[in-house]
Amino acid sequence: MLLAGGLDLFEDARLLNSDVFSLTRLQIMSSLAIVGDDGITYRELKASLGLTDGALYTNLKALERMKYLTEREVLLEGKRLTAYKITGEGFAEWAKTKEWLKKLVECGEGRK
Amino acid sequence: MGQNQGMAEKACGMRRGKEMNIGKVIACLKELNFRPRIDSFEHRLLIQKTVYLLQLKALKSGFEYNLYARGPYSPELTDEIYSHKNSMESLQTSEKLQAGELKAIQEFSEIFELSPSILEIASTYALFAFQRKEDPITALKNVKRIKQFYSDAQIAAGVSKAKEFLFEPLGKEIFEMKQEAKAWQEASLKAMRD
């Protein structure tokens, strides 16, 4: 079993993109990973994450610049809505991040 | 199949349910006379919410739903929708629906009109009130929070339709309703005689 703060964990952390590590970005990535190609509309993300337009837009744009998500328009009841979809790169980064977070939690189990 | 969908399943560490049955979903859409276009965001949403509500009532298609940013949602169903795009769009299946399932679909089509907003609201309310058994006020508050981009009138309509479709009175409630109606019935009969 790995110890808390084990060197392996630090080594693995070098492979991650630290720019994903904010609560908002992790929430966006996990929400988009669940729905895959279906994507989520901007208004759904805003309501479910409880964010202001400024906070949500800034973080979406940052993830888009990292090529982890793409923006597109969808039609719903005749209205054009902005929706976001995770990319292949986004999935790969999310999978790595999640795996690392799991290891981090397991490390903490060693000591109470 | 969408390229990211299978990856989504792996990325989320989900397992496929053993009893998932996309044939039932296709048979259900056929019964509803709804021929979907799988590339349409709106049509995929309609399928997700319709299947969720019908599963709560009677449909044995076996998809597991959880609450996500999009309300009640089954990533496994999305995966199956993309995998069976052609059969879904041509409504081809050999699957037969049971009498109880047909009855539920009939009731569903009488209450709902395949409106995305109404189905989104109704299914979200159903998740809180009927699946999680929250009291109606808490369930309504949760719907208003998650679906805050819909008007109060739309939310009221969706919630009312969810109740109409899913509410099943207990024996005691039926008795109480009959007792309440009995007085009115007697009064009207008396008025007719007089």
Image (tube, coloured by chain):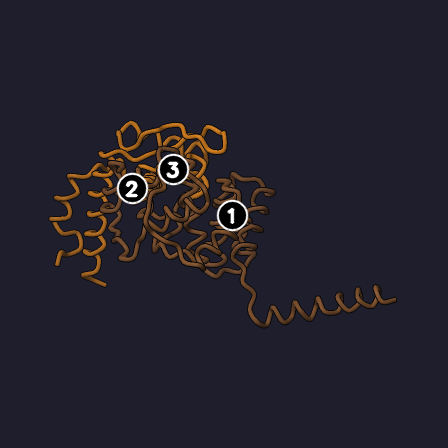
Residue nearer the viewer, A11 or B3: B3
Q: Chain of mark 1?
A: B
- The CA distance from mark 1 to mark 2 is 24 Å
Q: Residue at x 61, y 42 (%)?
A: B153
Please name the amino acid that badge 3 sits on. Ile
Q: Please indicate, yes or no, whether residue A79 appears anywhere in the rendered image.
A: yes
Q: Are marks 1 and 3 on the same chain?
A: no
Between A16 and B85, the one nearer to me in the picture: B85
Q: Quadrant of the N terminus of chain A?
A: bottom left
Tell me the chain of label 2. B
x, y percentage for residue A30? 31, 43
* Relative depth, front residue between A105 and B58: B58
Q: Which mark is residue A40?
A: 3
| Mark 1 vs 2, N-terminal side | 2
Q: Which of the labelled discs sits on residue B84, or is there none?
A: 2
Q: Mark 1 or 3, which is nearer the eye?
A: 1
Which amino acid lies under the numbered mark 2 shown in the image of this protein? His
User: Considering the numbered disc 2 on the image, is that residue within a helix, a strand or a loop?
Assistant: loop
Quadrant of the frame with the C terminus of chain A: bottom left
